[in-house]
Image (cartoon, rainbow, N blue to C red):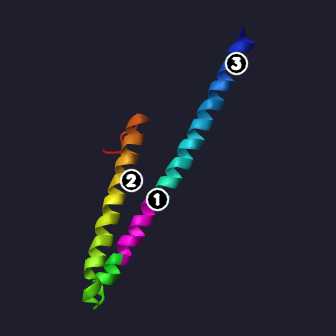
Amino acid sequence: RHVRERQRLEETIKDFRQAARRKDESLAMAFHELRSPLTAISGGIFILRSNRVEEHGRAVDIIDRNAKAQEQLIQNLLRLSQVDGLDWQS
């Protein structure tokens, strides 16, 4: 009986470790994805600071599109944290 309980516990621990690894991998990918819009937003700001007024409309579009993308990524992370029972909004 104890052997079966121990095996069951070891299997549960293994499952938890695999789930934690998958979560860590997902978070690493999400943080990488958060950097991409920031890079584009920085590029848009660079264009706005330049003297190329004809490019300003394009820069605003870049910033707007990537700010929205980043907002969506953050919302997805917050939903993930709620599923996991974490409270990252505090």
Q: Which residue does the numbered mark 2 point to in the structure image?
A: 73
Give SS at disc 2. helix
Q: Residue furthest right?
A: 3
Quarter of the view holding residue 12: top right
Instruction: Tell me the distance, in whole angstroms, between the alpha carbons under discs 2 and 3.
Output: 40 Å
Q: Is residue 2 above or below residue 17?
A: above
> Label 3 amino acid?
Arg
Instruction: Tell me the distance, in whole angstroms, between the alpha carbons under discs 2 and 1.
Output: 8 Å
Residue segment shown in magenta: 34-43
Q: Residue furthest top?
A: 1
- In the rendering, at what x and y percent does residue 75 appear? 34, 48
Q: Which residue does the numbered mark 1 point to in the structure image?
A: 33
Q: Is residue 40 above or below residue 47?
A: above
**Mark 2–mark 1 contact, CB under 8 Å?**
yes
Instruction: Tell me the distance, in whole angstroms, between the alpha carbons under discs 1 and 3.
Output: 40 Å
- The residue at the point 29 percent across, 90 percent down is 52
Q: Give the quarter of the figure containing the N terminus.
A: top right
How packed mark 2 is, by other alpha carbons closer than 10 Å (few <14, some 14-19, many 20 or more), is: some
> Label 2 amino acid?
Leu
Q: Which residue does the numbered mark 3 point to in the structure image?
A: 6
